Amino acid sequence: MRQDKLNDTICAPATVPGTGAISVIRLSGPDAICIADKVLGGALKGPDGNIVPGNTVKFARAADSEGKPLDDVLAAVFRAPHSYTGEDSVEISCHASPYIAEQFLMLLVAAGARLAEPGEFTRRAFVNGKMDLAQAESVADIIAAGNEASHRLAMMQMRGGFSSELKKMRDELLQLVTLMELELDFSEEDVQFADRTALTALAVRIRDHARRLAESFRAGNAVKNGLPTVITGATNAGKSTLLNTLLGEERAIVSEQHGTTRDTIEECLNIDGMLFRFIDTAGLRESAGNIEKKGIERTFEKIGSASVVLAVMDVSSPFRRLSESFKAIVGHVDFKAQKLMLLMNKADLYASGDEGGFSSELMERLARIYDRLQALLPEGVRIVKDVPVIPLSAKMSFGTDELRSALADYMRSMLGDPDSVLVTNVRHADALRATAEALDRAIKGLSDGLPTDLVSQDIREAIHHLGEITGEISTEEVLGEVFRGFCIGK
């Protein structure tokens, strides 16, 4: 965006016309109040003929370009710098008619405003110092938040929780690199202003913190877009039935015929304010045809990219078949980064009758199954302790509440402390990884006794990458990419 365009007065609908009782037309820029007053027939002037002060709401009866009545509206006036954009702004609340909103935009443009570009209001807020770039990006996340957890993370970021951590890291590095570079002016006197031991300790601490933040992107992205949860197991184990039961609708075809699911089916479900993206997959079996084999290959791909893997086992199946499918699943699970849960389905076949609960026959069978499956797990991974086991009946909706609770508990463990910072933006994660890599080089340079100017250069690079996140270091290309995805009125 050209710099001179930032001096224009812009307008756009801030709401979607026709979806509620009112629409809001937003106007911002140096002439915003004068243009709005002109369109509203002088309604923004007080009894003394002067424009009303900021934080004032005025009633107006607006007319169209031919002088015909258009609508009765309320206009909120905001004076710079006390507005969203930091500029003079007016928000006109009219009735939610697409025709009325369109007429107001035409009147505002005719009076001297221009239509805003996507994200231009928030971009001006960034340019005018109302928020940094990371906070500006969180505005889009707040608008898109579809669950409590993603809304909480976006609000924390918009209020500066993430930015304050980055600022502290950056300031500490700036102080030390300044001392290091000051030494260069006294190189002939062999003076050290920065203690190398303290500098190394600081670089290690900030590098490790940058890595932790970058690694939190996995959890942050899951909160934002839904925790990828794969439902897998042998054919006819009850995977599609489980998906339908969790969703409360017949989303997947259920049949006694083996291999009816040939491709993945994905649906999102909100559990306790957290979003899960369930992925039903093709059943695992060796005697599959070519098309079914492709579906199984895709199953393994989905297992590898999931955060949670739900291994559905038919408790009535022969031990050999249970072991084969479990072995195939375990071979594609990274136990350091993924959570495997064992769902012992069709437990209703072993119900204890009118007394309810599990029959002794089921408990004995489960014990034998656990012994066989335990032998297939990597060393140090234990069933029940590391791999939760939930007996259930997807068909009878028995045990599904326990499954929902287990999933919600795991998501909470990923989120950690409610006030902890999670990275939800891939741009931020990439910059944090680059920060850690630059500090790695600086730490090695300090250990190897490299000259001060070379170590300083690596630390400067780390500072640069941290500044890219908040916008202290930015290019027109980066800003264009960030704001291009915003809606017009934001």
Image (cartoon, rainbow, N blue to C red):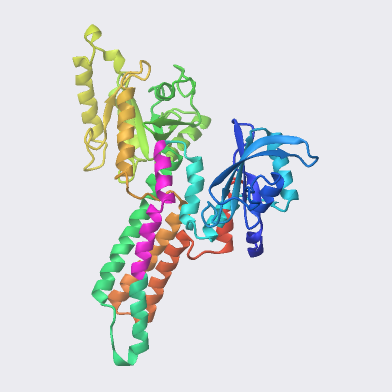
Can the viewer see residue 392?
Answer: yes
Where 299 sits versus 219, above or below? above
**Which quadrant of the figure contains the N terminus?**
bottom right
Residue 157 belongs to the span the image colors magenta: yes
On screen, residue 133 versus residue 6, left or right, reads left
Where 463 sits versus 232, above or below? below
Q: Depth check: 318 or 275 in front?
A: 275
Instruction: Please identify the quarter of the rendering in which residue 207 is found.
Output: bottom left
Question: Where in the figure is residue 180, as x and y percent of width and height?
Answer: 34, 79
Question: Where in the figure is residue 485, as x and y percent of width and height?
Answer: 57, 48
On screen, residue 262 versus residue 272, left or right, reads right
Magenta residue span: 148-173
On screen, residue 252 versus residue 443, left or right, reads right
Can the viewer see residue 280?
Answer: no
Where 256 sits versus 412, above or below? above
Instruction: Please identify the quarter of the rendering in which residue 338 is found.
Output: top left
On screen, residue 216 versus residue 200, left or right, reads right
Residue 489 belongs to the span the image colors magenta: no
Q: Main secondary structure of the magenta part?
A: helix
Outermost residue toward the right?
66
Question: Where in the figure is residue 42, as x and y percent of width and height?
Answer: 69, 47
Residue drawn at 51 percent across, 46 percent down: 140
Question: Where in the figure is residue 329, as x and y percent of width and height?
Answer: 35, 35
